[in-house]
Image (cartoon, helix red, strand yellow):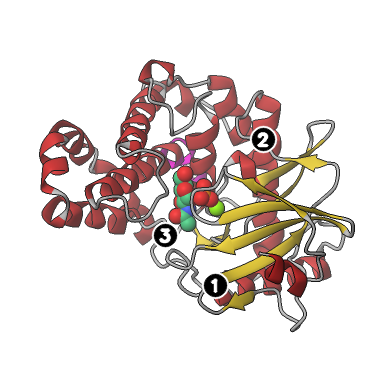
Amino acid sequence: MEAVLQKFGIPSDALIIPITSGIINKTWKVCSVNGNYILQQINDHVFVNPELIHGNITVIASYLKKNYSSYLFPAPILHSAGSQLLKEPGVGYFRVFPFIEGTHTIDVVANPKQAFEAAEQFGRFTAYLGGFNCNQLNVTIPDFHNLSYRYQQFQEALKSGNAERIHNEKSLIDKLTRLQFLVKQYDAITKNNSFKKRVTHHDTKISNVLFNEQDNAVCIIDLDTVMPGYFISDVGDMMRTYLCEVSENEEDISKIKIRPDYYYAIVEGYYKEMQNELTNEEKKHFFFAGQFMIYMQALRFLTDYLHNDRYYQIQYPTHNLVRAINQVVLLERLMEYETEFKKMKL
Ligand code: GN1
Ligand code: MG
C-alpha cells in the first residue's frame, strides 16, 4: 500500500482508513500531511479492463469542462508515470481521487430532501451530457443492466448451480419466475424507438452522492459503470435504494416498507433536470423503473447465491440469499403502490 501511495506522491506515513460501503471495489480514505485522498483498488474480476473506465472518465471530464466549466467533477489524480490508473503487477489496479473537503457521504436516505437532491444530481449529469454522443463511451461491463441477459443467467444458474441451494429455495425461485412479465416489458422498451440511450450512471445509490455540511448534494462520484443506458436504470436504482429505510442487507423483512414521499422526491428531482430530454413515452415509465431495477437485483443476488457466491462480497454464507429475499419483498411492497404512484402527473 505504501508503495502505491508513494507513486501518487502521497507520503507513506499517511493514515489509511477502510471505507466498506461498496461490495465490488476496495476503498480507503487516506489522510496525509499533503491532504486527504480516496484510494481505490478496482475489482478486476468485475471490471476486466479497468483502462476502459478511465477512458470514459477522461472524455466525460473534458466534455464537461468545456461545456459546463463550473460543474464539479472529481477526476482522479495522476501518478508518477503520468496516468490515472496504476497497474501493480500481481496486485491489481489502483487510482486516487482528491478528497473533496467539507463533504461526506450518507448510507441511508434520511429525508425526502436528500432523495430529491440526489435525483437532481443524477438527472443533471445525464442532461448536461445530452449533447455528448454516448456511443463514444466504452462499455465497462457488457450487458450490465440488460434484464433479459440477467434472466438468462438466472436460468443457467438453475441448471448448473448448487443443487442443494436450488432445491431449498424452490419457492423463491418460483416467485421470481412468475415475475418474468417484467422481462417482457423490458424487451419491449429495447425495441421501442421512443426509449433513448443516454449517458447513464448505472449505480445511483446514495453513497455515490457527496453532500456538504448543509446537507445539500454537491456532486456525484463513481463513474465506473457510466455507459450508454436507459433512464430507468438510474431512476430505478434510486427507488431500489432510497424508498425503504433499511438496505438490501436487512434480514427482518417486516422492516421493508415503502416511503411514498421519497418516491415523489426522486421523480421530481430527476424530472426537474430531465424533463426536456425525456420523451412522452419514457415519462410514462417512472414506476416501471423501480420494478425493473429491484427485480434485476433480486435475480442477480439469487443467481450469485446459486453459483456459490462468486460475484458479490458476502459476510456470511446465506448473505446473498437474504439480499435476494429482501429485494423480492421490496418489489412486492412497491407493487402495492402501483395505482397510487401511477397517478402522479408529470
Ligand atoms: C454493486 O459495490 P457497489 O455497491 O458499488 C453492483 C451494483 C449493485 C450493488 C448492490 C459493478 O455496486 O450493480 O446494484 O452492488 N456493481 C457492480 O449492492 O456489479
Ligand atoms: Mg459502484
Quadrant position of residue 292: top left
Residues in magenta, as a range: 279-289
Please say whether residue 287 is one of the residues in the magenta stretch.
yes
Residue found at the very far right of the displayed protein: 33
Label pair 2/1, CB-CB below 8 angstroms: no
All told, the count of numbered labels is: 3
- How far is disc 3 from disc 1 in space, using C-alphas? 15 Å
Comparing 188 with 224, the one in front is: 224
Residue type, mark 2 in image: Ile
When the figure is inspected, residue 10 is found, relative to residue 324, above or below; the finding is: below
Q: Position of residue 306 (x, y in %)?
A: 22, 48
Residue where numbered disc 2 is placed: 106
For label 3, being within 8 Å of ligand 1 is answered: yes
Q: Position of residue 84 (x, y in %)?
A: 70, 74
Residue where numbered disc 1 is placed: 50
| Disc 3 packing (10 Å; few <14; some 14–19; many ≥20) | some
- How far is disc 2 from disc 1 in space, using C-alphas? 26 Å
